[in-house]
Image: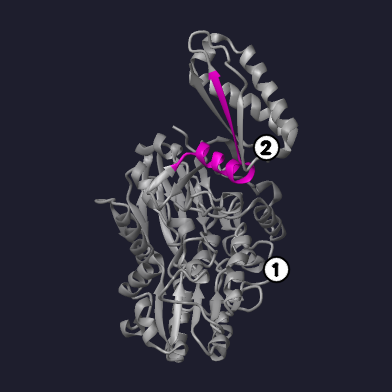
Amino acid sequence: MNSNLEVIPLGGLGEFGMNCCALRYGDEMILVDAGITFPGGNLNGLGIDLIVPDLEFLRGNADQLRAILLTHGHEDHAGAVSYVLREVDAPVYGSALTMGLVEQRIAERGLKGRRLERIEARQKLEFGPFQVEPLHLTHSFPDSFAFAVTTPVGCLIWTGDFKFDQTPIDQKPSDMGRLAEYGERGVLALFSDSTNSDVPGLAPSEFSVIEPLRTLFRKAERKIVASCFASSIHRIQILVDLAQEFDRKIVAAGRSIVSNIRVSRELGYLRAPQELFISPGESAQFPPDKVLVVATGSQGEPMSALSRMAVNEFKSIPIEEDDLVVLSARIIPGNERLISNLVNHFCRRGADVYDSRNFGVHASGHGYAADLKLMLNLTKPRFFVPIHGEYRQLAGHVRLAVEQGVVENNVRLIETGDILELSSKGARVTGKAPVGRRFIDEGHREEVDEVVVRDRRFLSEDGFLVVVLRLDRFSGELIGEPELVSRGFVLMETSAELMDETRQQILQVVAETPAEEKQDEEVFKEILRTRRMRFLRKKTGKRPVIIPLTLEF
């Protein structure tokens, strides 16, 4: 049995989102977070709604898993719980709001009989060799936790997402006193959020967005459409308070925001009287200057409520001249084009659009450099490991740690899949765990194979080329010339030379392929695909999907 502690990130290091990490001592293990990420960049428009971590490692060690601990309920930390619970059976622990949202997600996916435990800050938990204490930290989600995990080799602090907000909306400041107590006792390793490590200063309080939003409410002469992340309950509370102040009714638009508002109201996290809310259909009964729409889709997701409003496909809430649209969320890297298109559509309809680039309508929930330095100074770790962020944010956090006195040799910059072994004597990477991504089509409730996603991307970028071959069923010899059909690749009429050369290449492949392989249709198609792909990529720089069709006569 390994007497050292293994830290095995299955997602979230070197990338945004999909935060998920296993801690293992001997043959017992706990999982911290199980998050998703959303498709961006070259995955947009390929029928993928979300991405979850590959769970091969968990499936192979399912008998070792004692608990799943959730730092908070944002999708990038808790959105994959239902997918994990399909693969392994373990109790899930989190704050009341986090678990309320998780219960809703797993019910939507038809999972029953799972053990879901609501916990509070400073509550003592024990799972075999792991003694865990949740510590309250401020974030853009109420009752977010860090975890102090005491093990036989020492104590580690896992921050989750955090900032040191001095004026939190719920009036619950971070538990700096308890963090300092652990620092005085001795922290073997700190694993700390790196999202804003390259931003100087202290992160602004969530309170700081109230006045900019209030200014827009004063300015608005017609309806206001505000969008934020569906799980940003603090931001929704600010919008609710302003709606009451300016005598506006609220329309919740989008399935996730409707359900999250319901759950957070039921659990007492959102102070909002029921009479404040109206349905989309009822909004036409009120003057436009008496309506606030709170909608999903701040990242420009094509089928979100906000995107449908932007192109006037949300019939009960038409966008009209001088409506005011507020995107109260950060722009996730990779979504810039989607958001730009969204803004353009609203502007075409005469709406005024405000976002974090031109108005202070968003405050990050992640600490800036000074917040991260304060965490380092409170906990005084022997070893330091940056988590949550792309490689440049992790590397920037390393520099901050060294500046704050962590010995450079005691800093470990690891990425998803690295197995970090910790002991009282040292910390070293000892191997790699199987990791990867799984693509989910939520509309059809199915997983999309990576090969299918790859082909969709090639089709969207470089089109396809159909190769029709007529073969003698007995000899396997080619009958006549190959026929080629191009769609989205090259225009046949202007690429005669390339098409002729491609035919000659195909004739050569047919001649060189043994009869036995030609008789195996799938093998022969794969030979044609791979060899012609290389030829066409070399000639054109493109990678069209090759579709061989063999007809036997």
Residue 448 falls left or right of residue 120: right
Front disc: 1 or 2: 2
**Label 2 sits on what residue type?**
Met
> Can you say whether 429 is above or below 276 in the image?
above
Asked whether 79 or 269 is in front, the reply is 79
- Are the residues at dot 1 and dot 2 in contact (C-beta closer than 8 Å)? no
Asked whether 309 or 224 is in front, the reply is 309
Residue shown at the point (68%, 71%) measured from the top left: 201
- Please identify the quarter of the rendering in which residue 498 is found: top right
Inspect the magenta stretch and tell me whether residue 123 lies in it.
no
Q: Which residue has dot 1 on it?
A: 200
Q: Earlier in the sequence, mark 1 or mark 2?
A: 1
Look at the image and give the residue range highlighted in magenta.
Answer: 448-470
Q: Give percent across and percent down for residue 51.
A: 49, 49
Residue 124 visible, this orientation:
no
**Label 1 sits on what residue type?**
Pro
